[in-house]
Amino acid sequence: MPVVGALLLLGAPSVRAQDGASRDAAPPVAGVTVGDSAAAVRVALGEPGQRHESFGFVVWDYPQRGLTLMWDRDERTVRVMVLSRPGAGAVDGVRVGDAASSMQARWGSPARVRQDGRFFDFVRRRWTVTGEVVGGVVKEITVQLLD
């Protein structure tokens, strides 16, 4: 369940931004990025296939794309994007289904590795990206806007 992975990161202790992590804005995925408005998301993706609340967030699911967006209750800003299928798009050149080694090759060294090598956190100035790895393959990618 993508929400659980995102919440693991949201509830995790702070980690410092990685050296050389100078980009402020997260890269767009499927035409949207964390920080976008609901209007911008609707233009890029249309209405979500499913909409619900979970753990204090409003969740928009685009199941055919393999993309989940999480919003604060006011739905003004995308806070978290979860990519669960290769067709969801790439985050700086890495897709779900890629070899785990591609994360470090494209994103650099992780700021933190959690749960015995299952979650790799890469921290930027205003956003983070986490790759979930199972069997040496990227299973899910979570991009989170930092406050």
Image (tube, rainbow, N blue to C red):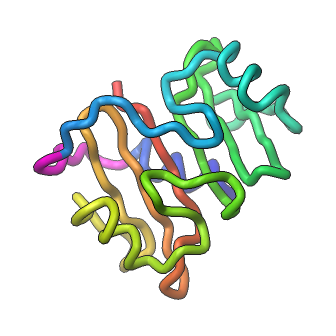
Question: Residue at image x 59%, y 66%?
Answer: 96
Q: Quadrant of residue 66?
A: bottom right
| Residue 89: image location, x then y, percent | 62, 52
From this view, report whether residue 96 is shown above or below residue 72. Answer: below
| Residue 6: image location, x then y, percent | 53, 48
Does residue 13 belong to the magenta stretch?
Answer: yes
- Magenta stretch: dominant SS? loop
Q: Can you name the residue that lies furthest to the left here?
A: 19
- Decide if residue 130 is on the left or right side of residue 139: left
Question: Residue at image x 57%, y 26%?
Answer: 78
Question: Residue at image x 60%, y 16%?
Answer: 37
Quadrant location of the C terminus in the rendered image? top left
Quadrant location of the N terminus in the rendered image? bottom right
Does residue 42 belong to the magenta stretch?
Answer: no
Residue 18 vs residue 5, the one in the foreground: 18
- Decide if residue 52 is on the left or right side of residue 135: right
| Residue 125: image location, x then y, percent | 24, 35
Q: Quadrant of residue 40?
A: top right
From this view, report whether residue 103 is shown above or below residue 20. Answer: below
Q: Which segment is the magenta one?
A: 12-20
Residue 73 vs residue 140, the one in the foreground: 140
From this view, report whether residue 78 is shown above or below residue 2. Answer: above
| Residue 55: image location, x then y, percent | 63, 37
- Decide if residue 125 is on the left or right side of residue 89: left
